[in-house]
Image: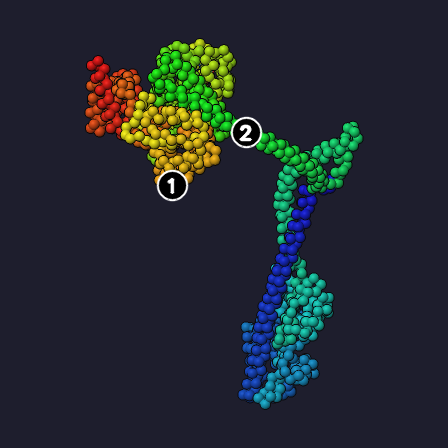
Amino acid sequence: MRKSIGTQLFTYILIGTLISLLSISGFFYKVLEQRAQGAIESTLHTQVAMVENKIQKVEQQLQDISAITRSLKQNEVDGAEVYKDAILSLFEQRSSIITAFGIGQTKRAILSDRDWFWPYFRINHHDNRDLGSPLPAPHTDLRYWDVTEDHYEEKSYYLDVLQKGHSYWIEPYIWHGFTMTTFTGPVRDLADHIIGIVGMDISLDAFEAQIDRPVVSGQGNLAILSRAGNLLAYPADPEKSKALASYQDFPGLAELWPQMQQQSNGLLLKDKTFWAYRKIPETGWIMIAAVPQAVVILPVIRITIIGLLGASLILASISATFIYRLNQRLNPIVERCKAMMGADSDRLQRLQKGKTENPAAEQTIEAKLEGLDEIDVLDISFSQMSQQLQGSMESLEARVKERTADLQKAKNEAEEAKNLANSANEAKSEFLANMSHELRTPLNGILGYTQILQRSTSMTPKEKDGIDIINRSGNHLLTLINDILDLAKIESRKMDLTATAFDFNGFLRGVSEICRVKAQQKDLHFEVIKTGDLPSGVIADEKRLRQVLINLLSNAIKFTDEGKVCLNINALRLEPKIPGETALCRIEFRIEDSGIGISSSYLERIFQPFEQVQNTKAQSEGTGLGLAISNKMVTMMGGELAVESELGQGSVFSFELSLPESLTHHVQNDEAFQSDITGFQGPAKQLLIVDDRWENRAVLKSFLQPLGFEVTEAEDGEAGLSTALEEQPDLIITDISMPRMDGLTMIQQLRRHPKMKTTPIVVSSASVFATDQQQSIDAGGSLFLPKPIQLAELLKAMAELLTLTWVQNSSHSSSKPKKAAEALTLPHPERLKTLLKLSRSGLINNLTVELDRIEAEDEKLGEFTQQMRTLAKGFQLKQIQQKLEEYIEAESAVSSS
Ligand code: ADP
C-alpha cells in the first residue's frame, strides 16, 4: 500500500505550514530590517549632530581668538605677556576636544620687537612626549611652549595657511607620538592683512571617546574618516587611527568609498554588512556606521525557529489526533470494501470456473491492493459497486418492464372480467326488475280482487277461507319478489338509505301492533320493553328499520310455538349535547324468543341467502332471504347483527345503531285505517283510471265504484289525455309504462293545460326503480303507490288528496276508544284527572314529574307514561288533553259496565 491517507495528509499540512511560516518570517525579516536600517541611520544622525556640535564650537573658538588678537593689535598692545595671558585665558575656556592651541604671528605683524612669535598652550600629558614647560599653579596641568623654536616660518603647517588664506582642517598626522588633527586659519587685521595664524590641535582620542558606542542592538561600530579617506576615529580599533590607517585598510569600505563620495548620506549593503554614511558639512569628513547583517537576521531566525517548533508541535498533536480518528473510521470501511471485493472476485471465479472455489482469490485481492492507499481502495470498490449497481438497475428495469407488462395484462383482464361481471350484474338486475314487474301485474289483479272479495258479506265461510288463502299466498309471493329484489339491489350496491326524521315511539308502536296480532294468533305472549332515555324522534331510514324489525320479530314468532316473544329497546347512551349540534343516541334492539332455537353448526351460515334449517315445519313459510337482507341493512345503517341461540331454548337477535335525535318530527296520530268504509260524505267524485291492463283497471273500478266514485277508464296515455281534458275528473290514477304514450308524458302534457294544473294524480306502477318513482313526482304526479296496490293505502291517499270524510260502518267506530284503552294499562282515573288538570294549566314540568311518580309506582304503566312523555316533549298539550279525556271516558265506561 502507498503511504496512508493520514501520513499524506500530515505531510501536506506540514509543508503548507512551513511555507506559510517562512513567508511570515520573510515578512518579519523585511519589517525588522527596515526598522534596523532606520535605527542605524538615526544613531548615525545623532552622532554626526554631536560631532558637528563640537566642531562648531572649535570653529567658534578660532573666531574668538582671531577677534581678540585683532582687537589687541588694534589697541596697539605690544607686550608678549599680554598676548600670552589672553591666549591662556581663552585656552581655559576651550572646547573639551581641543588639546592645544596657539597663535603664531607673521613676520613682526603682532609684536614689533621680534620677527617670530607663537605662544602655544597644551594639556600636560605627564609623559616623555610632552613639549614645553609646565605652568605654575593654578595651571599645573598645562604646559607652555614657544613654537618659534620649531622654526615654524619654514614649516608647511604655517606656509600652507598663508597660501590658502582661509581656515581648514588638516589631515590627521602624528606629532611627537600623538595622532592629531588641527583646525587652522589666518588672523586678519582691519586692512585684511594676515597678521598671524591660529592652530587648534585636537586629539583623535577625543573623537574616539565621543563616538565610542554601539550603533544598534549593542552591535555595530562608528568611524570618522577625513575628506581624503584617512581614519580620524575608530573606537573599535583605536590603533588603526593612531597608525593613520585609511579607508583602503577596510576591505568592504574600499569598494564603497567612491559611492560614498557621490551623496551626502546613504545606506549600503556590502559583505553582509550595512554601511550607513553621512558627511559632516563643515569639515568634509564622513562618519560611517557599520553593522553586520546578522544583527538583523538573528532575531528573525530566532522567531522563525521558535514559531516553527511550536507550530509543528501543535500541528503534530492535532494531526495525530485527527489521523487517529480518521483511521478509526476509515479502516472498517476499507476492510469492508476489501471483504466485498474479495467476495465479488470469489463469485466471479466461481461463475467462470464452474462453481470450483479458488483459494488464491483472497491473495489476488491483497496483491491487487498492494501499493494503494485507502482512497484508491474506496475508488476501486466504488467503481466495482457502481458497475454492479448499474447491472442490477438494468436487470431491475427489465424486470419492472416485464412485471408492468404482466400487470397491465392482468389489469386489462381484470377490467374485462369486471366489465363482464358488471354487465352480468346489470343483466341480472334488469332481469329481476323486469320479472318483478311482470309478476306484480298479475299479482295486482289477484291481491286486488281478494281484498275486494274479503269485504264481501255474501260469501260462505268456506269461500272466505279460500279467498284468505289466495290472499296469503299472493302476499307470500309478493314478499318473495320484494326480498329477491332487495337482495339484488344490495348486492349490486344500488340500495340507498333514505334517512328522515320520524316519531320513534309511533314507529315502535306500529311495529309492535303488527307483530302483536301475529303473536296473539299463535297464543304467544308478546312484550315490548323500553329502557333508558329513549328519544322521541330519530333520523333514520324508517322503512328499512321497520323491515328489519318486522323480519326479526316475524321469525321469532314463526319459530316459537309457546312462551313469549319480546322486543327490547334500550337507549344505551345519549351523547352529551353540544348546543347547535344533533345529539347521537345509541340504541340497542334485542329480539328474544323462547322458540325452537338454532343449532350452533347452522348459526355460522344463518346470514347467507337461501339458508334454512332443514326439516323445520316453518320452512315452507319462509324464503330464506329475510336474515340475509336484514343483516346487510343493519350493516348499511352502521350496526352489526348478532345472534345467540340454544336449541330448544330460544334465540336472541340483537344490533346497536347510533341514531341522530330529531326534534322536528311529526308525532304520528295513530288513526288506524278503517277497513269498514262504506262511502264518503258530499257529492260523488269523478275518477279517471289510465292503465293498459284491463285487470288492473277492473280491480280499481270494482273497489272504488261501490264507495260512490264515478269511474272512467283509458287504455293508454293518449286516451287518458283526451278523456281527462274532456271529462275534467276530480282525480286521476295512472300507470307509467303504456303503449303509444306513457304515463309520465301524459302527466307532463296534462300539467301544461291550465285546467289540469292542480288535479291530483296518483301514479301507480309495478316498477321497482326509485328513479321511476322520483320521475313521476318530477313530471307532476301528486303521489306514487307501488303495485300491487294496497287498497287501504289508496283510500288513505285519496282522503288526503280530495279532503274526503269517510262514512264507516257505525257499529265498529263506536268501539274504537275502548280498544285503544284496552291495549294500554292505564293509571287510576283520579291520576288521569290530575294529569289533565296539569296539562290544561300548561305545567309541562309538573306533568313530567307526575308521570315519573306514576311510573315509579307501577312498572306496567310504562307504555302509558312513555306515550305522555313523548307528547309532552313535543309540547303537544292539545293532544295530551284529548288522549287523557278519551282514557278517562274509557275508564269510566269500563267501570260502569
Ligand atoms: P325465512 O324466510 O326462512 O324465515 P330467514 O332468512 O329469515 O328466512 O331465516 C333463515 C332461517 O333461519 C330460518 O329458516 C330459520 O331456520 C332460522 N331462523 C331465523 N330466525 C329464527 C328464530 N328466531 N328461531 C329459530 N330459527 C330461526
The color scheme shown is rainbow
Q: Amino acid at mark 1?
A: His
* Local SS, label 1: loop
Q: Residues within 10 Å of mark 2 (few under 14, many from 20)?
A: few
Residue at the limit of the structure toward the right, as seen here:
353
User: At x 46% / y 36%, what residue is drawn?
Assistant: 741
* Sequence-first disc among 2 and 1: 2
221 over 704 or under it: above or below: below
- Classify residue 571 as left or right of residue 245: left
Q: Residues within 10 Å of mark 1 (few under 14, many from 20)?
A: few
Splitting the image into 4 quarters, where does residue 30 fall? bottom right
Splitting the image into 4 quarters, where does residue 22 fall? bottom right
**Distance from mark 1 CB to nearest ligand 1 atom below 8 Å:** no
Q: Quadrant of the N terminus?
A: top right
Residue under label 2, please give it.
427
443 over 114 or under it: above or below: above
* Local SS, label 2: helix
Looking at the picture, how far across and down is residue 106, in whole percent? Answer: 64, 86
Query: Looking at the image, which is closer to me, 305 or 455?
Result: 455
Tell me the CA gap for discs 2 and 1. Answer: 39 Å
User: At x 76% / y 38%, what residue is drawn?
Assistant: 368
User: At x 51% / y 19%, what residue is drawn?
Assistant: 610
Query: Looking at the image, which is closer to me, 622 or 491?
Result: 622
The numbered dot on residue 463 is none
Looking at the picture, how far across and down is residue 316, in whole percent? Answer: 64, 44
Residue under label 1, please give it.
753
User: At x 26% / y 20%, what residue is drawn?
Assistant: 814
510 over 713 or under it: above or below: above
Q: Amino acid at mark 2?
A: Ala
